[in-house]
Amino acid sequence: MGRGLAHMALTPAVNLGPATALVCRECGTSRELGPHYACEECFGPLEIAYDFGGITRADIESGPRNIWRYRGLLPVPSNIADTPNTEPGLTRLVRADNLAENLGLQSLWVKDDSGNPTHSFKDRVVAVALAAARELGFKVLACPSTGNLANAVAAAAARAGIRSAVFVPSDLESQKIITTAVYGGTFVTVDGNYDDVNRLASEIAGEQEDWAFVNVNVRPYYAEGSKTLGYEIAEQLGWRLPDQIVVPVASGSQLTKIDKAFTELIKLGLVEDKPYRVFGAQATGCDPVAAAFKAGHDVVRPVKPDTIAKSLAIGNPADGPYVLDVARRTGGTVEDVSDEQVVEGIRLLARTEGIFGETAGGVTVATLRKLVAGGALDPSAETVIINSGDGLKTLDAVAPVVAPSANIAPSLEAFRAAGLA
């Protein structure tokens, strides 16, 4: 196929590694691998079923220094590391002792995914989606996005030598618009919120058969990329699971797939079976999952987003009900924080650990603080939080509240007069 996505008819010979079928998350109906995302029987969402075989820690540790070390656990060809891609993953897990002391925690880690190629966790999911799209014969890599996904799709397509087409709300942060447009693909801003953009993308996907919308018609493959966060956390902790983890919630897929990764590692005997608690974090201006959790509901009522945390501003989250299931099954919760608390969370992480997170990271830190203060999270248990993106992408959130300590003349006298010593 070369570097492009040569179009071809889907055949049983499709090579997606250990992936064996697509299975409905609601009714359990199974169907062949392909560009399908909804069950034909009940319209429930599809996810990947696997036959992993025998995988050892040594197999993983000897692999590439990126997500392809876990290729035996993903729906990708076994030779995926040899194809042009952005090689995301294996980002740092930072021991956050300063932040832990500030919040009254004994053991805290930050999984800092701002170190990915386009500076967010979306590089992981796009890499897996691109691998599947290649194998399924698509020609264009596309997406609706709140920003980070647009960056990742445009960059991954450029690296692969194919066309990209991304669609975003027109009020997106300027930093994310620039860092998408620079890659030179088709880039469309839409007058509406993310849910409007997503609806439009779904309609376009129905007409453009050669377009792989990573979070629409190849969503089951795309979503599996988030599992690599869970795999890496366990490996970086010395092949063990944390006691607690706090995850930002947009569509909810990241949280549910981290949980899936933990359960897979347990089943494969790669980590010890132990209880762990999963907590979801949302902004109050877009908190449909948190609201459903607090009300004791099993369904998530859509909302109209109104928050500075635009990367989490999905008013009708596809995986919302499954986030509720995970939080309740593991003994966690889903909590929300105000925009003011989000900004405080960004600044707290920056000044305690030297990590400048975007607004989603601010949501997670602020939620962690709220969970500790409210007694929902055990301060003595080992805890991991996710920083999913770089603060340089959301500068407007903190620009009004940060400034130089002083402006002085270039003289020692001026320095002394300013009382800066």
Image: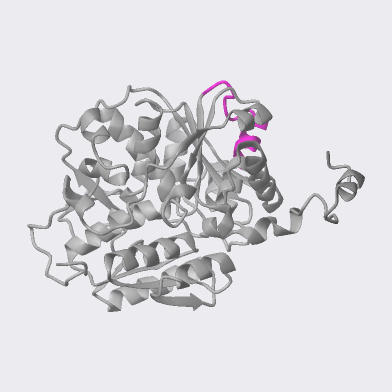
Residue drawn at x 36%, y 75% is 203
Residue drawn at x 54%, y 77% is 191
Taking depth in this image into account, of 334 and 213 the one nearest to the observer is 213
Question: How many marks can you see?
Answer: 0
* Residue 371 located within the stretch drawn in magenta: yes
Q: Position of residue 171 (x, y in %)?
A: 58, 71
Q: Position of residue 110 (x, y in %)?
A: 52, 37
- Tell me if 64 is positioned left or right of 351 in this view: left
Q: Position of residue 360 (x, y in %)?
A: 56, 51
Residue 29 versus residue 65 in the image, above or below: below
Taking depth in this image into account, of 251 and 331 the one nearest to the observer is 251
**In the rendered view, how is the structure colored?**
one colour
Rendered image quadrant of residue 330: top left
Rendered image quadrant of residue 11: bottom left
- Tell me if 67 is positioned left or right of 337 in this view: left
Residue drawn at x 26%, y 41% is 69
Q: Position of residue 164 (x, y in %)?
A: 34, 72
* Residue 238 located within the stretch drawn in magenta: no
State the extent of the magenta-drawn residues as a range. Answer: 367-381
Q: Is residue 267 visible?
A: yes
Which quarter of the rendered picture does the N terminus lie within? bottom left
Q: Is residue 287 visible?
A: no
